[in-house]
Amino acid sequence: MDFKYNGVDITTVAPVKIDDIRVSPIQYAPVVRPRAFQFGSEFVRMRGGERTVALTFALLDNVRTSRQNALFALSEWAKTDAEYMIEIPDTTRVLFGVCTQKPDPSIRQWWENKLRFVFSCYENPYWTDKEETTVDCGVSVSVAGDAPPLMVIRNTFDEAAEDVEYSDGVRTMTFSEIPAGDMVIDLNRQTAAVDGVSIMGAFDPAGQFVEPGTGSFMITGTGALSYRQRWE
């Protein structure tokens, strides 16, 4: 059994024996409105929180020096500065999380098998396609999953362009001017930039950002649509 974090298999970092991998469901936080006079409350909507991935393992090394060095290496492997890709055996879908708990090993009991890492998935708690699917704008796609996919539109403008539109047939995004360079429109975050510089000042406020969704989907415009399907 292997377990990759940020593209690195834990078994290549230290001679660990994985005991178990547990992926929690997404935590739900219902939003309700109390009734003024009657008992009970009215359901408004459901908010989704984070999920966790718990990895328990053993480090069967009875030489204290090498065991401690292996623990140091594992601590460096479990990064805590950002959320990285988590690859779990027997699935092509991945998660993205940051290490929020590291092991508390016994100095004496080298045979213990309950050493534990916990990774928390905050920004994207969904199971996600490992690779992006990319099609030209104007091509119909069928998006699977039970959660909104990650979607971006990319295009390289050799020269500045005016009145650039992208539409799904219901919502239309119009930019009065886009400078030359590499443009990225992030439909999930509702941002647009060229070479990393925001162009939202050119966005027509009368328009609407296209919303990522499942099912049959087509966005007209210039460039390419890239997406990753997601599941709870």
Image (cartoon, rainbow, N blue to C red):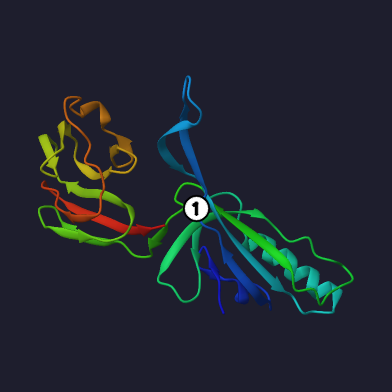
Quadrant assignment, res 159: top left
Does residue 74 sit above or below 18 in this rendering? above
Tag 1 secondary structure: loop
Task: Return the x and y of residue 209 as percentages of the image width and height.
Answer: 23, 36
Does residue 98 sit above or below 89 in this rendering? above
Residue at (48% x, 24% y) in the render: 38
- The residue furthest front is 38
Identified by mark 1, the residue type is Ile
Q: Between residues 169 and 190, which one lies in front from this camera angle?
A: 169
Look at the image and tell me in which quarter the N terminus lies. Answer: bottom right
Residue at (73% x, 61% y) in the render: 103
Does residue 203 sit above or below 90 in this rendering? above
Q: How many marks?
A: 1
Task: Return the x and y of residue 196 as percentages of the image width and height.
Answer: 33, 40
Task: Return the x and y of residue 21 as percentages of the image width and height.
Answer: 59, 69
Task: Return the x and y of residue 120 as percentages of the image width and height.
Answer: 57, 53
Per the image, the residue denoted by label 1 is 26
Residue at (44% x, 50% y) in the render: 124
Quadrant assignment, res 75: bottom right
Q: Between residues 27 and 168, which one lies in front from this camera angle?
A: 27
